[in-house]
Amino acid sequence: MPTALITGASHGIGKAIATEFARHSYHLVINCARSADALHALASQLIQEYHISCFTCIGDVSNPDFVSEMFQKAHDAFGTIDILVNNAGISHIGLFHEMTTTEWQTLLNTNLSSVFYCCKEAIPSMLAKKSGRIINISSVWGEAGASCEAAYSAAKGGVNALTKALAKELAPSGIQVNAISCGAIDTRMNACFSSEERAALEEEIPSGRYGTTKEVAELAFSLANSTTYLTGQIIRLDGGWI
């Protein structure tokens, strides 16, 4: 069975992606930085329900030493990683000029540098077998930009650019790299909105609703199993919003 490594998998989109891959009998390596109990509970559930192998790695993917250790454990367990899903991320809402340099660096490290660290570790074994899929979870703000989310927008814009450039570099070796540009998805990251703000946002979306984590997961699985000719794409999943 193929193996997928998913970062930020304890809740929301990452949890839904892990569940979708497990449902299709993928072995899993799932990661989160802080929600250890939730991640262990998810692993136990997926093992019991889908009879797969699944192990957890608790740590911060913005730390390159941890990422190196995580991939070494994954390779020891499964030999290779067939699918890498870079999902881990944090948000920051506030006026740009009030953002501290520490907040800026933390957000960039978590949302962008982590993608570099994980790709760097995953690519060598993919090159050796001349196959592999990298799926980056991005945001429409990486394309359009968002007021009071300048740093988040910059980081996701970097993810999009890295996706397109890396896809060109790796295509001759049979490795595909794509990103899902998420719109308003119903996750705890968006729980900060009041019911009035949520209703106003839904009115702006032609589909008239938030997207679901299951829809993101189904698209991620589709990308992992699509034609090898599909690469370097930023695929927008936003209900027609942007």
Image (cartoon, rainbow, N blue to C red):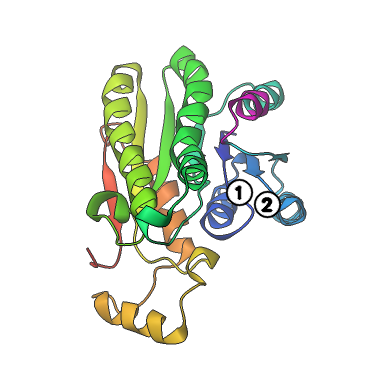
Viewer can see residue 231: no
Residue 215: image tag: none
109 or 205: nearer the viewer:
109
User: As displayed, is residue 161 above or below residue 47?
Assistant: above
Q: Could you tell me which residue is drawn at 51 percent across and 27 percent down? A: 117
**Does 155 sit left or right of 119 as displayed?**
left
Q: Which residue is mark 1?
A: 22
Q: From the image, which quarter does the N terminus lie in?
A: top right
Cβ–Cβ under 8 Å for marks 1 and 2: yes
Q: Is residue 64 magenta?
A: yes
Q: What is the residue that sits farthest to the top in this orientation?
A: 128
**Does 112 sit left or right of 227 as displayed?**
right
Mark 1: secondary structure? helix
Q: Which residues are magenta?
A: 62-70
Mark 2: secondary structure? helix
152 or 232: nearer the viewer:
152
**Does 71 sit left or right of 93 as displayed?**
right
**Does 154 sit left or right of 17 as displayed?**
left
Q: Main secondary structure of the magenta part?
A: helix
Q: From the image, which quarter does the C terminus lie in?
A: bottom left
CA distance for labels 1 and 2: 6 Å
Q: Which residue is mark 2?
A: 50
Amino acid under disc 2: Tyr
Q: Could you tell me which residue is drawn at 33 percent across and 38 percent down? A: 158
Q: Position of residue 177 (x, y in %)?
A: 35, 33
